[in-house]
Image (tube, rainbow, N blue to C red):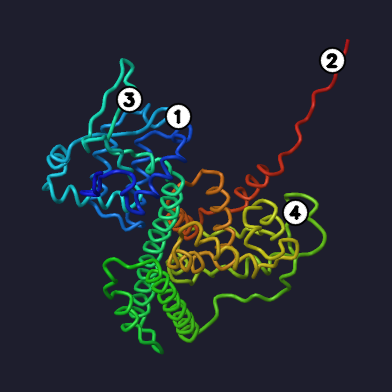
Amino acid sequence: MQSVENGTGDVRRLADAQWASARLVESYAGLPEGVSKAMLLDRFERAAPRLDIGEGLVRLIRALVRVTQEQDWTGGIFRPIAWPSNDTLGEELQRSRTAVQSLIRAAVRAGLVHMKDSGNGKRYGFRGDRGEIVEAFGFDLSPLGARWDEFADITAARGIEQARRRHLRLKVGEVRREVRTVCADALERGYLGYDWQRAVDLASGRLPRSPTLPDLESLETQFLGLLAAVDKAWLAAREGDESEPTGSHDGAHKEPTTEPSAERATYSAFRGEVVADRPGPDVEGRGGGAGPPIEEEVLPLSLVLEAVPEIHPFLDDPASAEWEDLVTAAYQATTLLGINLSAWREAREAMGRNRAAIAVATILARWRSGEIKSSAGGYLRAMCERERTGGLHLMPSLFGLRDRHHPKPRRTAGLDRR
């Protein structure tokens, strides 16, 4: 009777791990349809870190799977059995014989292989004319195939976590840059009332080399709070520094219940709430009133909401939305579009609060339709440049977007007279 040595031996002498792998062999019915041995090996290698499986053991399994054939994994009478000797594995893995024996025992304990031994403890195998295994003794890899679902689930969970980590890394980096941008602008303008340099130092500090997911989530919360504090201080300092207002918002912001009768209507009821929000010709960046005058566009909120339904998910109640609601919704949409805070602030300075919100809404509509595939922030800055020179006209864009969702009915030709 053979004794258990080097991970091999008679079934009656197998350890608990070998018995567990034997049960997996009995339950194995082949890989799922469409799954190849390469896919199985890929999922196993991706799941290995979560299962505390070291690189040496991964290399052993890779070497064993490589010498099998695809038909060996179909189940039934076919079994994925490999029979390389320890010397062959030692040359393949660049390990000593003792190290190879240790890896084999680890593979059995991990439930990855089942040792199928011959009467004399040797490993060997024969294949028929069609490549099928006629007789083989060695490493039965059926337990590896039986754990396909486990490896696939672990790999999927790991992929989700890695995607989350990448997102958080990018988000933290973007927020840190935004904090530095706002603080640099405040320092250049000489704003007081906040320790801008300390905020810059916090946003420029070194991050952990390999942060965990909880670490990144904590960093995101920390820097978002810092950005909110910096932005609030910047707005307060700017309001205190302004000597005279850039415009007033008198007049009701509530949308009337009646719709304009035609597209060419003057919309005089909306002129106070749309035009008054725009910066005057003396705003910095307009060249002190030089250049061509900008024609005042009267853009009713009802037209914006009808032309850009893509903004509706950002509104609590589109039917009763007001201009303040649209501005808040546009600010929320900037995060989805990847528009940073400095670009949003530049748009509000160049266009005014309401027109900036309309500009972001039109960008959102074109981004949803695929017209804008990248750099939505650059697109918004380009609109700011056209606004400064008087070349930005939002009315035609809104009419064009509205016609996409509400096309005009085609006129049918009259019947032919006979």
In whole angstroms, how far apart are the C-alphas of marks 2 and 3? 80 Å
Q: Quadrant of the C terminus?
A: top right
Amino acid type, mark 2: Asp
Task: List x then y, in percent, for residue 415.
Answer: 85, 18
Task: List x then y, in percent, for residue 349.
Answer: 49, 69
In whole angstroms, how far apart are the C-alphas of marks 2 and 4? 37 Å
* Residue 314 position by quadrant: bottom right
Secondary element at image label 2: loop
- Which numbered disc covers residue 133? 3
- Residue matched to label 4: 265
Residue at the top extreme? 418
Q: Earlier in the sequence, mark 1 or mark 3?
A: 1
Placement of 416 over or under 167, stated as above or below = above
Q: Are marks 2 and 3 in contact (CB under 8 Å)?
A: no
Tag nearer the camera, 2 or 3: 3
- Callout 3 environment at 10 Å: few (<14), some (14 to 19), or many (20+)? many
Residue at the front extreme? 1
Task: List x then y, in percent, for residue 161.
Answer: 42, 58
- The residue sitting at 76% across, 35% down in the picture is 409
- The residue sitting at 33% across, 17% down in the picture is 130
- Residue matched to label 2: 416
Q: Quadrant of the N terminus?
A: top left
Q: Earlier in the sequence, mark 1 or mark 2?
A: 1
- The residue sitting at 37% across, 32% down in the picture is 79
Placement of 324 over or under 158, stated as above or below = below
